């Protein structure tokens, strides 16, 4: 009987793991290696925090630049084989950085609960945000992606996945981790740079708003 129960437990555990999306599995692995535990009822896809951490004691945050160094671009299965590679250029990266910092200013700092900092201190966290995956729909709205200046219509603009890491600024210990994937719209509409940038702007606003809420949850652990 005990043997049967053990088998049932293993099967259920494997089944639970198999339901995780790739970005959730990656976050789960990183969290377990750092000794973090799952936070239930998260505002984001997955969320983890160090059981012994007192996030509530931190009143300031050092905002690292948005990390775009490992972003993976996944081509849509509907892409034309002749489409040029979809890649982030310097202008794109600057735009992402701008929207990230604007959203952080609005949802982390302007509400008065946290203050921006530049130097490590005992009451200061370090926030590192990474974009790890972009899965665009359609060719990129530039001279390389659309040399013939054709209009493209898609159902949404694809999806984008982010990872958030919070560290103690003096010990550099990982205290909390979250990962989330956002759909960049769901309606059929013209896929151009203006509309795509609006969706990206909304994604960063969503993420930083939810991260602010998540930090309140972490502080109660």
Image: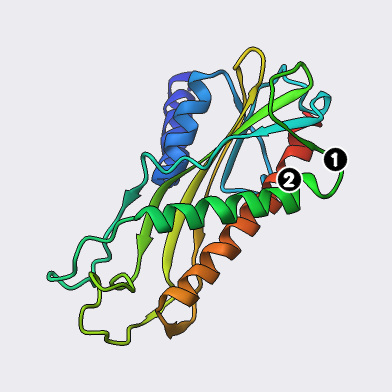
- Residue hosting label 2: 212
The residue at the point 84 percent across, 49 percent down is: 111
User: Does any portion of residue 171 appear in the rendered image?
Assistant: yes
- Residue hosting label 1: 113
Sequence order check, earlier mark of 2 and 1: 1
* 214 horizontally vs 73: left or right: right
* 201 horizontally vs 89: left or right: right
Q: In the picture, residue 138 is in which quadrant?
A: bottom left
Task: Decide: is 132 above or below 99.
Answer: above
| Nearer-the-camera pick, 5 or 195 | 195
Q: Position of residue 60 (x, y in %)?
A: 77, 31
The residue at the point 59 percent across, 23 percent down is: 36
| Nearer-the-camera pick, 133 or 195 | 195
| Real-space CA distance between mark 2 and mark 1, rounded to the nearest whole angstrom | 9 Å
Q: Position of residue 178 (x, y in %)?
A: 58, 39
The residue at the point 59 percent across, 51 percent down is: 100
Q: In the picture, residue 136 is in which quadrant?
A: bottom left
Q: Position of residue 32 (x, y in %)?
A: 51, 23
- Considering the numbered disc 1 on the image, is that residue within a helix, a strand or a loop? loop
* 71 horizontally vs 168: left or right: left
Whether pointer 2 and pointer 1 mark residues with C-beta atoms closer than 8 Å, the reply is yes
Task: Decide: is 15 above or below 5.
Answer: below
Q: Position of residue 40 (x, y in %)?
A: 67, 39
């Amino acid at each position: 009987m005990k043997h049967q129960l053990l088998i049932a437990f293993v099967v259920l555990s494997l089944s639970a793991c198999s339901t995780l999306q790739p970005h959730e599995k990656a976050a789960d692995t990183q969290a377990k290696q750092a000794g973090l535990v799952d936070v239930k009822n998260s505002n984001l896809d997955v969320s983890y925090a160090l059981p012994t951490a007192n996030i509530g004691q931190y009143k300031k945050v050092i905002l690292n630049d948005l990390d775009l160094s490992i972003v993976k671009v996944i081509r849509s299965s509907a892409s034309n084989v002749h489409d040029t590679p979809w890649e982030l250029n310097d202008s794109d990266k600057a735009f992402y950085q701008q929207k990230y910092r604007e959203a952080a200013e609005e949802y982390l700092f302007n509400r008065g609960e946290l203050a921006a900092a530049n130097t490590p201190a005992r009451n200061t966290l370090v926030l590192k945000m990474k974009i790890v995956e972009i899965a665009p729909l359609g060719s990129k709205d530039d001279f390389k992606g659309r040399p013939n200046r054709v209009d493209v219509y898609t159902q949404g603009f694809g999806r984008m996945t982010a990872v958030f890491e919070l560290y103690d600024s003096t010990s550099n210990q990982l205290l909390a981790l979250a990962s989330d994937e956002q759909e960049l719209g769901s309606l059929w509409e013209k896929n151009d740079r203006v509309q795509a940038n609006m969706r990206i702007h909304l994604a960063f606003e969503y993420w930083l708003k939810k991260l602010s809420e998540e930090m309140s949850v972490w502080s109660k652990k």
